[in-house]
Image: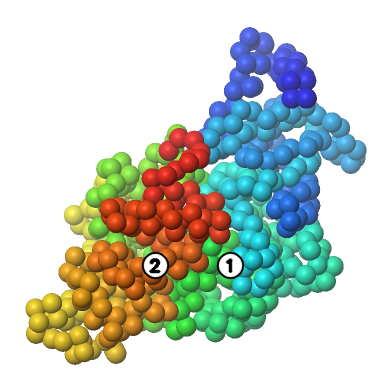
């Protein structure tokens, strides 16, 4: 089958060549060896032809764990006479490709899947007859699709199966054949069929107003988005309104706690708008996923996906919601054109998140959060080679997963904070509002930002800061000597008290912990590493019940200390935590730290073997790497 298509393509390739310049012997050769292009993580030749609109029509098969159906693309042709469309795919079953003429009639076309290239998958090459501006692809996803997690009825709190997507950075191609690069934006519509007892939601319009019993859902996305923001989830979901344009979806067990925890959402949106301009996406809802969700949150447009682990009961982990909301400007509205420019998405967002938190809870709380980030970054930076410590990096030939280290997040954030300290808050805010308006619904690279900042900030206020200083942030490793470290009086006080406890001046009982926020607790627990033994752990636990804490950030630090000190009750809790939670930020370091000990390695592997069937493919991959048992690592790193 495939070889017949290959032969047709060779002939067509030659014919295409004949129409244009003089054919050279290399033409057919080249057409088989598709290389990544302007974006090193996509095969799409989007400067030649790009997707303008997508119409998806999918059926969700929860038993077979597949999505099946077709997608129709409207194309923008940028180079007249260009005769092929290259899409990204990974693990997809492509059944057929058809061209649709302007009168609606269809025309079979030649196509083939190029050879598999590790995590990048396979290019799908479609020969485009001239004049054709619509293409239809009939396809199905496979159960192992890396960008989807399928949970069986036994694996959810509702007792019904669940499925959700995670497309960032380059996994949309495992459930839709598309130009999987953040450089390309398109609008879309979707019809999705699912079992009647389940609800389908998408990062799109049409969610809340389309709750129905026939199992057929329609969505529209009128704002152009990049592929990594494509999102879908299916499960037994309930909805609770939080404000006129906001609400939350969750499985029945979670919905009340979720609605309670997130009741400030509408206020957060208003704060965002006051800071950086109108919210341009219509509604903003949250979706609480099962605990296997591999991240804290994912900024899917109109519908951020969240881990249930941030539902602490007291709103203390809402910075994560502020973060995902902030992406509605930094990331979703103005988008990094490729993953080496990730700091444009994440650095601005961490800064913006901090501004929302400050507006909601005051400067004292915000400075604590800033200090936690700073300390985390300082601990993390030396673990990376100099080239990795730059905001602008070269990721060609590597898995874009590697972009997601603390540097683009926290170094990015402190860069923007530094701009604020140099130019003043008012000037910087006005600049940022203009920046979001100037590049709204565009994908840009670091150089575009740099040129814009030079023109609109540095040249207008030449005494405030120099371009060389900005370039040091962007292109040099480490932190510039002139970076401004955050200070927190509250944490200094915690340090003094901890010191007094260690030296025996103060008993645990006398620590004024009643007045501590979760962030002071975080700082305190971090400071205990290397300072406590098993006995201290038992006293701390007796006094503060840390093994039973409901706050996942504190629990995580407590579990790391439990590994460090071989504290029994903590280690039991660790096993049950790893069985339930698949959030990579916690699971990866916990497995790594347990596997590093001579007594814990076998135990870590045993826990993993029991837990892995409930993990997302990403969590499985990361855990196996942490444990050094990576069986099926895909592609180069
Ligand atoms: N866009 C990310 C989620 C993500 C990370 C997707 C890595 C793919 C690869 C999201 O906005 C994010 O940064 N989430 C963080 C929370 C944030 C408060 C730092 C997370 O999930 O921990
Ligand atoms: Zn983010």
Residue bearing mark 1: 289
Direction from residue 241 to residue 273 in the image, left or right: left
Residue bearing mark 2: 574
Direction from residue 447 to residue 369 in the image, left or right: left
**Residue 271 shows which numbered tag?**
none
Q: Residues within 10 Å of mark 1 (few under 14, many from 20)?
A: many
**Residue occupying image coordinates x 17% and y 78%:** 498
> Residue 375, relative to residue 78: is it above or below?
below
**Kind of element beneath mark 2:** helix
Q: Examine the rendering and report whether any part of residue 14 can be seen.
A: yes
Quadrant of the image containing the N terminus: top right
Q: Position of residue 430 (x, y in %)?
A: 42, 66
Q: Residue 303 lies in what quarter of the image?
A: bottom right
Q: Examine the rendering and report whether any part of residue 429 can be seen.
A: no
Quadrant of the image containing the C terminus: top left
Q: Position of residue 63 (x, y in %)?
A: 74, 56
Q: Residues within 10 Å of mark 2 (few under 14, many from 20)?
A: many
Q: Position of residue 570 (x, y in %)?
A: 34, 71
Q: Nearer the viewer, residue 143 or 565?
A: 565
Which is in the foreground here, disc 1 or disc 2? 2
The figure's colour scheme reads rainbow
**Kind of element beneath mark 1:** loop
**Residue occupying image coordinates x 64% and y 66%:** 154
**Residue occupying image coordinates x 34% and y 74%:** 569
Direction from residue 88 to residue 365 in the image, left or right: left
Q: Residue 253 lies in what quarter of the image?
A: bottom right
**Residue occupying image coordinates x 79% and y 63%:** 195
Direction from residue 235 to residue 361 in the image, left or right: left
> Residue 47, relative to residue 310: is it above or below?
above
Q: Position of residue 315 (x, y in %)?
A: 45, 81
Whichever of callouts 1 and 2 sits on the residue coming sooner in the sequence is: 1
> Residue 5, relative to residue 18: is it above or below?
below
């Amino acid at each position: 089958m495939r070889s017949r298509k290959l032969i047709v393509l060779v002939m067509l390739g030659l014919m295409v060549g004949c129409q244009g310049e003089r054919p050279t012997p290399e033409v057919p050769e080249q057409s088989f060896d598709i290389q990544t292009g302007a974006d090193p993580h996509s095969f799409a030749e989007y400067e030649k032809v790009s997707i303008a609109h997508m119409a998806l029509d999918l059926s969700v098969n929860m038993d077979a764990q597949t999505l099946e159906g077709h997608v129709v693309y409207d194309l923008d042709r940028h180079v007249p006479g260009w005769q092929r469309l290259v899409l990204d795919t990974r693990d997809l079953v492509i059944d057929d490709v058809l061209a649709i003429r302007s009168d609606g009639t269809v025309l079979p076309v030649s196509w083939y899947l190029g050879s598999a290239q590790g995590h990048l998958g396979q290019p799908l090459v479609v020969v485009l007859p001239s004049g054709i501006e619509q293409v239809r692809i009939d396809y199905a996803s496979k159960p192992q699709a890396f960008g989807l997690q399928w949970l069986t009825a036994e694996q959810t709190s509702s007792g019904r199966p669940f499925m959700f997507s995670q497309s960032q950075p380059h996994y949309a191609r495992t459930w839709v054949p598309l130009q999987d690069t953040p450089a390309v934006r398109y609008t879309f519509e979707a019809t999705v069929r699912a079992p009647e007892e389940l609800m389908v939601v998408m990062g799109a319009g049409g969610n809340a107003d389309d709750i129905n019993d026939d199992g057929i859902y329609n969505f529209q996305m009128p704002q152009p988005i990049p592929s990594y923001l494509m999102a879908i989830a299916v499960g037994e979901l309930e909805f609770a309104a939080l404000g006129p344009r906001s609400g939350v979806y969750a499985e029945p067990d979670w919905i009340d706690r979720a609605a309670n925890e997130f009741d400030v959402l509408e206020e957060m949106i208003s704060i965002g708008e006051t800071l950086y301009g109108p919210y341009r996406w219509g509604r903003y809802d949250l979706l609480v996923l099962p605990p296997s969700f591999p991240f804290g949150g994912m900024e899917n447009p109109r519908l951020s996906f969240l881990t249930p682990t941030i539902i602490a009961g007291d709103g203390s982990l809402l910075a994560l919601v502020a973060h995902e909301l902030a992406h509605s400007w930094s990331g979703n509205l103005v988008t990094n054109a490729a993953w080496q420019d990730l700091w444009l998405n994440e650095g601005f967002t961490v800064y913006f998140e901090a501004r929302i938190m400050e507006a909601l809870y005051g400067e004292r709380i915000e400075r604590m959060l800033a200090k936690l980030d700073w300390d985390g970054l300082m601990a993390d930076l030396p673990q990376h080679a100099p080239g990795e410590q730059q905001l602008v990096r070269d990721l060609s030939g590597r898995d874009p997963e590697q972009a997601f280290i603390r540097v683009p997040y926290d170094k990015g954030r402190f860069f923007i904070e530094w701009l604020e300290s140099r130019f003043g808050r008012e000037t910087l805010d006005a600049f940022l509002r203009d920046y979001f308006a100037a590049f709204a619904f565009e994908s840009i690279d670091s150089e575009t930002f740099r040129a814009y900042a030079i023109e609109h900030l540095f040249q207008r206020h030449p005494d405030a800061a120099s371009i060389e200083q900005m370039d040091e942030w962007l292109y040099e490793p480490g932190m510039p000597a002139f970076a401004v470290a955050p200070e927190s009086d509250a944490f200094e006080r915690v340090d003094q008290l901890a010191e007094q406890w260690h030296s025996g001046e103060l008993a645990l009982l006398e620590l004024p912990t009643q007045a501590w926020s979760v962030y002071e607790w975080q700082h305190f627990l971090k400071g205990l590493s290397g300072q406590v033994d098993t006995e201290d752990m038992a006293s701390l636990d007796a006094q503060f019940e840390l093994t039973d804490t409901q706050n996942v950030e504190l629990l995580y630090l407590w579990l790391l200390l439990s590994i460090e000190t071989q504290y029994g009750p903590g280690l039991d809790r660790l096993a049950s935590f790893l069985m339930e939670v698949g959030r990579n930020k916690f699971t990866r370091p916990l497995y790594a730290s347990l596997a590093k000990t001579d007594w814990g390695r076998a135990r870590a592997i045993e826990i993993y073997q029991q837990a892995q069937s409930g993990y997302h493919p990403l969590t499985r991959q990361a855990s196996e790497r942490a444990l050094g048992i990576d069986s099926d690592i895909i592609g180069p790193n």
